[in-house]
Image (tube, grey):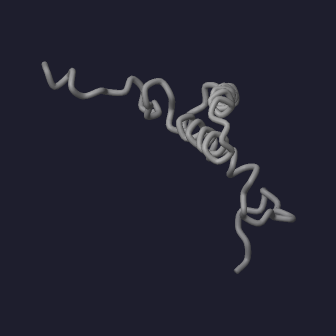
Amino acid sequence: MEDAKRYKTPQYLGEPYRLIVFTLDEVFAAIITIYLVGSVCDLLVTSLFLAVFFLYLLRKAKGNEGPCFYVQIFYWYFSLSPKLAATPPSWIREYLG
């Protein structure tokens, strides 16, 4: 019975790993904002407000999507792979060769 209390079982299979109440991408965004604006520019209070604002924007943008939502966005809109100028017709199933 004590083993059940020791280990946390996720409720859903796709549930993201959380640190307190924030997901890892939200934690990274807050840490980067606080470091860049707070430490480098020497504006600590402003960086805290910006971090809260960026967390709000991230949660609004992500909505109810899964943890790989940003990977999908970067793949579709910022891909480094070359774009095809023309694709072959879909009705051709076999090519000669």
**Horizontal arrangement in the rendering, residue 66 relative to residue 63 (left or right):** left
The correct choice, above or below, for 61 with respect to 70 in the image is above
The correct choice, above or below, for 11 with respect to 92 in the image is above
Q: Position of residue 69 (x, y in %)?
A: 62, 39
Q: Position of residue 51 (x, y in %)?
A: 63, 32
Q: Quadrant of residue 6?
A: top left
Q: Quadrant of the C terminus?
A: bottom right
Q: Residue at x 63, y 42 (%)?
A: 70
**Hey, which residue is sitting farthest left in the picture?**
1
- The answer to whether residue 55 is seen in the rendering is no
Q: Position of residue 49 (x, y in %)?
A: 67, 27
Q: Residue at x 24, y 28 (%)?
A: 7
Q: Residue at x 31, y 27 (%)?
A: 9
Q: Nearer the viewer, residue 35 or 65?
A: 35
**Horizontal arrangement in the rendering, residue 85 relative to residue 76 (left or right):** right
- The answer to whether residue 76 is seen in the rendering is yes
Q: Nearer the viewer, residue 19 or 31?
A: 31
Q: Position of residue 87 (x, y in %)?
A: 82, 62
The correct choice, above or below, for 19 with respect to 89 in the image is above
Q: Quadrant of residue 37?
A: top right
The correct choice, above or below, for 84 with respect to 36 in the image is below
**Hey, which residue is sitting farthest right in the picture?**
85
Q: Nearer the viewer, residue 72 or 6?
A: 6
Q: Nearer the viewer, residue 87 or 83?
A: 83
